[in-house]
């Protein structure tokens, strides 16, 4: 029986120490040990993206990361997107554009879309769809999701020009 | 998932001795996008999982115009396509890296892992074959090199012996007026497994009108990805025209021996080899004329 290991990571800006077995995924540890239940388990095999978190600045499926691999890593989850009770503009746009129905895919979409807008603020519709291809929405709300991301681009530009 | 131990060696010789100690019951973890799923679904078993991402030789990525590309076996896909020099020199490889899974997969998945997983439909392997890549292997009896063309032996099987580890993949330096491209066919726009895939590399004459040399690799149309040798040889000395590309496509079809499955029929897959060969040759020639 493999022993539990102590892992230290920076999660949402805070140093966190947790115990895990080698076969536990980062997703399991986030949800079951650390009570960060924003990342969702959809397919548990890397297809759906509902468990997307940022690992050292890159979006990953947390179901395909062993928690022990997160030693020394910097992780941000959907919980870090709103600040001080204020929704991030992207979240506000998802809300206003009704870019969700059941909501299971939303945390993954938010994390991936935020990463895309930070990397490529002027992403075209094609680029948005291409980069969000690892996130599945089974309520088939893709058009509204893409529109919410585009609205967030517009809103951010307006805020900058004002 | 079944219980296993986890080791993250920081030196290559440590990884080799760990592999030797566990005599076949150890599994290598690079990006984890295949192996974690296989362990979870019980398709593979491990007593110990060896994370190779702390070993310098497996994480280094270096490119120079003189010596070409050296890619550690655990280098994730995004590092390839985010590097403009690598995109310019090895178009087929970066075409592949950009469409293996989605963004989240590409943050972790490596070309080395794609090669070692040895799927008949592996998107990076035709591009490695087209770019004449070499696999560098280390094991208990020292190191050896294997041409990527010879690496895969059956679906999910390859030349790695028990205790051996893929360290890096090297690609020769780009010669002038050469370029490559990869295309696959999938019924969706993104995130699917190739029904057929073709990677093509060409070297044109200085005036750009004649193909001096070419190499094509195919995937998803036989038990292992293949080098389309006859079609490649045919192209030498031929004019870079649509007729030539189509004729090469017909020759490439001859070595396709696909299976019928939910992704496509035998007839359809063979047809796709012709179409994709033609199209990738055209893109590769266009790219070669530009640089």
Image: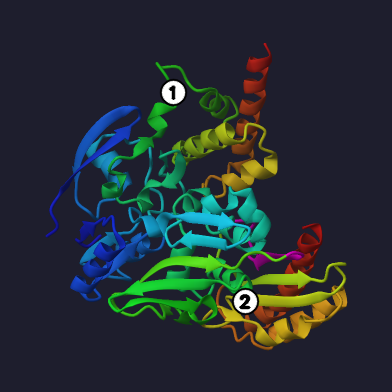
Is the residue marked by circle 2 packed among few (<14), some (14-19), or many (20+) residues within 10 Å?
many
Report crowding for label 1: few under 14, some 14 to 19, many 20 or more residues within 10 A (C-alpha): some
Q: Which residues are magenta?
A: B176-190
Q: Which mark is residue B157?
A: none
Q: Position of residue A142 (x, y in %)?
A: 60, 42
Chain letter of mark 1 equals A
Q: Is residue B94 left or right of residue B38?
A: right
Residue that mark 1 sits on: A82
Q: Secondary structure at mark 1?
A: loop
Regarding residue A99, the answer to whether it shows in the image is no
In the picture as drawn, the residue positioned furthest to the top comes out as A162
Q: Which residue is mark 2?
A: B218
Quarter occupied by the C terminus of chain B: bottom right
Query: At 26% from the left edge and 43% from the top edge, which residue is drawn?
Result: A29
**Snapshot quadrant of residue B222:** bottom right
User: Residue B137's quadrant in the figure?
Assistant: bottom left
Q: Considering only vertical position in the picture, is B34 above or below A37?
A: below
């Amino acid at each position: 029986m493999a022993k539990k290991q102590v892992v230290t990571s920076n999660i949402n800006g805070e140093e966190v120490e947790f115990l895990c077995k080698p076969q536990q995924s980062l997703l399991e540890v986030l949800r079951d040990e650390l009570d960060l239940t924003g990342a969702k388990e959809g397919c548990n095999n890397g297809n759906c993206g509902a468990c997307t978190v940022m690992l050292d600045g890159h979006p990953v499926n947390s179901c395909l990361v062993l928690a022990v691999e997160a030693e020394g890593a910097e992780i941000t989850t959907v919980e870090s997107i709103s600040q001080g009770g204020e929704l991030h503009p992207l979240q506000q746009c998802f809300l206003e554009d009704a870019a969700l129905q059941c909501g299971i895919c939303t945390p993954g979409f938010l994390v991936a879309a935020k990463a895309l807008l930070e990397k490529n603020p002027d992403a075209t519709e094609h680029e948005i769809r291409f980069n969000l291809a690892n996130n599945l929405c089974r309520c088939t709300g893709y058009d509204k999701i893409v529109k919410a991301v585009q609205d967030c681009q517009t809103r951010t530009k307006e805020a900058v020009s004002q | 998932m079944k219980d296993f131990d986890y080791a993250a060696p920081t030196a290559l010789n440590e990884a080799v001795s760990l592999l030797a100690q566990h005599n076949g019951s150890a599994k290598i973890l690079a990006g984890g996008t295949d192996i974690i799923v296989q362990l979870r679904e019980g398709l593979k078993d491990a007593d110990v999982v060896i994370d190779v991402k702390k070993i310098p030789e497996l994480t280094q990525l270096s490119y120079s115009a003189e010596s070409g590309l050296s890619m550690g076996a655990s280098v994730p896909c995004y590092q390839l396509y985010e590097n403009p020099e690598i995109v310019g020199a090895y178009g087929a490889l970066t075409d592949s890296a950009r469409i293996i899974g989605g963004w989240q997969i590409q943050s972790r998945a490596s070309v080395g892992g794609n090669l070692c997983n040895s799927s008949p439909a592996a998107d990076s392997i035709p591009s490695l074959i087209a770019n004449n890549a070499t696999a560098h292997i280390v094991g208990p009896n020292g190191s050896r090199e294997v041409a990527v063309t010879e690496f895969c032996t059956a679906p999910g099987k390859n030349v790695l012996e028990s205790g051996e580890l893929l360290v890096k993949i090297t690609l020769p330096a780009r010669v002038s007026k050469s370029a490559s491209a990869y295309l696959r066919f999938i019924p969706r726009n993104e995130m699917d497994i190739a029904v057929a895939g073709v990677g093509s590399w060409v070297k044109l004459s200085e005036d750009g009108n004649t193909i001096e040399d070419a190499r094509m690799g195919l995937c998803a149309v036989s038990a292992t990805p293949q080098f389309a040798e006859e079609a490649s040889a045919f192209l030498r000395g031929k004019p870079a025209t649509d007729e030539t590309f189509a004729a090469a496509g017909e020759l490439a079809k001859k070595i396709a021996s696909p299976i019928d499955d939910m992704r496509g029929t035998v007839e359809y897959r063979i047809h796709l080899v012709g179409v994709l060969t033609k199209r990738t040759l055209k893109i590769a020639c266009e790219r070669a004329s530009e640089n």
